[in-house]
Amino acid sequence: MTDQAQSSEALARDRRLQQGIDQYGVGSWELNLATRELSWSVTARRLFGVAPDAPVNFDTFLSLIDLEDRERVAQAIQRAIDHGDNLDLMYRVADRQPSHWLRSRGGLVKEDGGAGYLCGIVLDVDQQKVLEQELRLQQSQLRSILDTVPDAMILIDGRGIMRFFSSAAERMFGLTEKEAIGQNISILMPRPDATRHDNYISRYNSTGERHIIGIGRIVTGQRKNGSTFPIHLSIGEMESGGERYFTGFIRDLTEYQQTQARLHELQAELVHVSRLTAMGEMASALAHELNQPLSAISNYMKGSRRLLAGSRDPNTSKIENAMERAAEQALRAGQIIRRLRDFVARGESEKRVESLAKLVEEAGALGLTGAREQGVVLRFRMDPSNDSVLVDRVQIQQVMVNLFRNALEAMSNAPRKELSISNTRVADDMIEVTVSDTGAGIPDDIKAKLFQTFFTTKDTGMGVGLSISRSIIEAHGGRMWAETNSAGGATFRFTLPIAPGEDLNDGA
Ligand SMILES: Nc1ncnc2c1ncn2[C@@H]1O[C@H](COP(=O)(O)OP(=O)(O)O)[C@@H](O)[C@H]1O
Ligand SMILES: [Mg+2]
């Protein structure tokens, strides 16, 4: 074969190679370092949007790169030329909306004595970039979700090694992500779970039997400092790259359990107090009813003793004595009843500075259970600047619960069901609380009797709620009354003393 034939054979092979590469979307390029002329394959031209016959040089190339990437690309190419670095660049094409990504790879080819060439390929990596960006977006979305939810998230692999540890998990367990990742999840559990956890996983891996996955459970967690706390744990599972992973979502139940305990405590207190106050009411009713017969008894005694005074009966002095005792006992009976009433009305009350909003909220938790299910709209409009009152918490909650229950009962058949609670300053030292409903309201003939003990219009009513409530409010130095509101329902108002030290100028 002649030299000429050999070189034309080589040229043909080059061309075939070139075409082959071009067919798969990979363009090729060659930069003559002496002339700065560029030669681009068909595909390279297509990728840059340049006509097949248009002359191109290095400056044309730079002008086709997005301004934001241009400087970086020019510098990298200069480094490749100066130091022989390999080129691998991703950049955006100029004037494309949305932006479009290309990738160039190449290297220096020196010819003896000459300045040489920079040669390489260029390909479209837009899809890859879009995916990458989507992935990054999803990752940051996931991060922000995990940062926001109070639940902690931990990812472990099939051997129980922690691979992801959310910032909520850091807070919950007092352990940094760095400390946690790579460690076995069992460090977050007290014994005996900690020692058994590896077995749990391997049992699941071999049997596929689910004990906790997809179900969720209350278990105990252990912080870095060794203290333990109740958690609700739900576990999901997934597979990636042939490996099994488990995701755990963890909610700290400490506060929840405290709230539950507090609610139970409150409920118990209220039951206790309502029994006490009902007793008080009973006692004052009894005192009232018994006072008359008791004073009648002592009057009859006095009369009888006067009659006896002129008698010659030898037993006179004994009878007189007995009558005097009887009168004393009648008097004592009256005193006992009066003391009982005073004890229940005034005693046992413990006044403290309390937050009205909190009182309303707690009383609502007890008195308004089921309200939303009944379709009642609740409007709490508590003014935080008039919040501090000096009261006996349990007693005032008793009043609120009474009013809430009455309102719900009054609205049970009403077409419109709205319950509003608000507060406002009414004097320098008093705050007025308003409880309004859209129930049947209060007929005029009933208004006067509303607060009387044992007055009720309900079949199963006791008729003591409002009378007790009014005595509680009056024992606090406040007033309580009822009105008919514009919706035709009832509005109950009561006043309470502002906590001392609450600046009087606040409202001015
Ligand atoms: N929000 C209200 N709307 C209409 N009537 C009410 C309301 N609250 C109380 N009442 C009337 O006052 C009466 C006395 O209430 P209360 O002392 O709490 O006793 P009870 O609820 O046991 O009847 C009720 O039977 C009812 O007729
Ligand atoms: Mg009632």
Image (cartoon, rainbow, N blue to C red):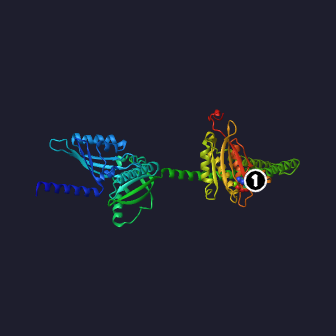
Question: Where does residue 234 sit, x and y in percent of width and height?
Answer: 43, 58
- Describe residue 46's horizontal placement relative to residue 424 as left or right: left
Work out whether residue 464 can be spotted: no
The residue positioned 43% from the left and 55% from the top of the image is 249
Work out whether residue 419 can be spotted: yes
Question: In the picture, residue 80 is in which quadrant?
Answer: top left
Residue picked out by circle 1:
442
- Describe residue 311's horizontal placement relative to residue 483 as left or right: right
Question: In the picture, residue 371 is in which quadrant?
Answer: bottom right
Question: Where does residue 11 sit, x and y in percent of width and height?
Answer: 19, 54
For residue 173, above or below residue 457: above
Question: Where does residue 170 sit, x and y in percent of width and height?
Answer: 40, 47
The quarter of the picture showing ligand 2: bottom right
Label 1 within 8 A of ligand 1 by Cβ: yes
Amino acid type, label 1: Ile
Q: How many marks can you see?
A: 1
Q: Along the line of sight, which residue is nearer the eye, 335 or 52?
A: 52
Q: Secondary structure at mark 1?
A: loop
Please identify the quadrant where the C terminus is shown. top right
Residue reaching furthest to the right: 310
